[in-house]
Image: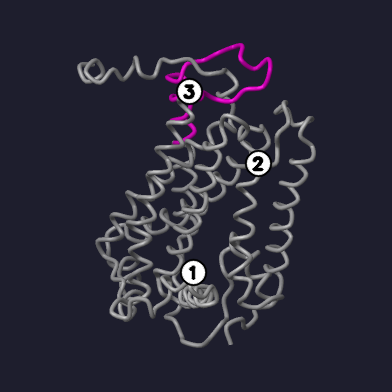
């Protein structure tokens, strides 16, 4: 109670918010934030035993699985939570897009969210490389091929940029320090703008207000449900570890979230690594610039909604195609 008074916890959470914000879609952002916190805590634990040297990386992960107390369970939580975070943050972005909450004056709130989406995808990608099994090694080989294909702009991401440090060690540094710092900087901007500009509503939704304190309690309930799902998945389907990497072999496919890139590689080769992801990613910055209509109601924004969901459908079709297509050689 004394701490509450000193830090004005209750008073700081009693501000009013629209009652519509207590619906499930509005908790997707907070669930994603909770997942990020879980990733940090589990990542700190795993980092105590991981060795980013190429000769030892795979063996250190095997040690985590077989010898470290709760190592296999913590690693599975780390991986399953990463999968679910990508799902919740994507659904959150789609909900904001559907509601038109990127419109003036919330353009920078949207752009900060899109940048965070990019950071989360990069965190996921760098995490897949670190076990240095066959899948991780092939992912890193594609990363290097894309960086080299970008010429001057990708030079900093190639092994030749710093010959004294192995590329996997640099990706590990990205994963545990640079990307998390950037992510939380963007998160601070994102949360500040939400608080400053309030939650976007449509006409008639301002009634039946609630308070953030009540919203926070529901937020915790949804968060605990999320943690329960992550824990159950980790117990039932522990994350596996592939065989040690073999140079010059391509026998794996990327995780589902990156399969659309694999499909483009099937058709255009490694050039797709240079143009595909940046082009699709840049499209996510366009809605505030293209949608200038007065109304934010979905029925008044059919054109921009059709444009957005056509892109999502395209990515799903590409990923589905790559899922069923036989594995192909892209680097040789």
Q: Residue at x 55, y 23 (%)?
A: 22
Q: Which residues are magenta?
A: 197-223
Label 3: which secondary element? helix
Q: Quadrant of the N terminus?
A: top left
Where residue 153 is drawn, which disc sits there? 1
Q: Residue at x 65, y 78 (%)?
A: 269
Image coords of residue 73 (percent x, y): 38, 56
5 or 242: nearer the viewer:
5
Nearer to us of marks 1 and 3 is: 1
Give the mark, 1 or 2, whose residue is nearer the N terminus: 1
Compared with 83, 55 (above or below) is below
Q: Quadrant of residue 167?
A: bottom left
Nearer to us of marks 2 and 3 is: 2
Label 1: which secondary element? helix
Q: Which residue in the protein does label 3 denote?
A: 215
Residue 206 lies left or right of residue 295; in this view the side is left
Where residue 289 is drawn, which disc sits there? 2
* Magenta region includes residue 208: yes
* Magenta region includes residue 153: no
Q: Residue at x 59, y 12 (%)?
A: 208
Q: Quadrant of residue 325?
A: bottom right
User: In 3D space, how far apart are the residues under numbered discs 2 and 3 (Cα atoms)?
Assistant: 32 Å
User: In 3D space, how far apart are the residues under numbered discs 1 and 3 (Cα atoms)?
Assistant: 45 Å
Give the mark, 2 or 3, whose residue is nearer the N terminus: 3
Where residue 277 is drawn, which disc sits there? none
């Amino acid at each position: 109670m004394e701490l509450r008074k000193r830090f004005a916890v209750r008073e700081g959470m009693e501000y009013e918010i629209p009652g519509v914000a207590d619906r499930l879609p509005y908790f997707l952002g907070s669930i994603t934030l909770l997942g990020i916190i879980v990733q940090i805590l589990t990542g700190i634990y795993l980092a105590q035993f991981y060795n980013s040297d190429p000769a030892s990386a795979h063996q250190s992960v095997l040690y985590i699985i077989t010898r470290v107390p709760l190592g296999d369970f913590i690693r599975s939580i780390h991986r399953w939570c990463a999968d679910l975070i990508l799902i919740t943050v994507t659904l959150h972005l789609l909900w904001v897009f559907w509601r038109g909450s990127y419109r003036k004056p919330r353009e920078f709130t949207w752009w900060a969210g899109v940048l965070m989406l990019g950071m989360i995808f990069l965190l996921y990608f760098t995490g897949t490389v670190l076990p240095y099994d066959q899948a991780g090694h092939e992912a890193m080989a594609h990363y290097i091929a894309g960086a080299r294909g970008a010429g001057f702009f990708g030079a900093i991401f190639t092994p030749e940029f710093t010959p004294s440090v192995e590329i996997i060690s640099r990706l590990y540094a990205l994963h545990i320090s640079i990307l998390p710092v950037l992510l939380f900087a963007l998160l601070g901007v994102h949360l500040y703008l939400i608080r400053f500009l309030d939650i976007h509503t449509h006409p008639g939704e301002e009634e039946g207000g609630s308070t953030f304190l009540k919203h926070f309690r529901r937020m915790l309930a949804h968060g605990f449900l999320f943690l329960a799902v992550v824990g159950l998945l980790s117990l039932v389907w522990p994350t596996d570890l592939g065989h040690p990497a073999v140079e010059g072999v391509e026998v794996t496919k990327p995780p589902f979230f990156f399969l659309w890139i694999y499909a483009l590689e099937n058709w255009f080769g490694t050039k797709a690594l240079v143009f595909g992801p940046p082009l699709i990613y840049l499209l996510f910055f366009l809605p505030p610039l293209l949608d200038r209509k007065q109304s934010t109601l979905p029925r008044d924004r059919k054109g921009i909604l059709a444009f957005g969901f056509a892109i999502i459908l395209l990515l799903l079709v590409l990923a589905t195609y790559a899922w069923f297509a036989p594995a192909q050689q892209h680097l040789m």
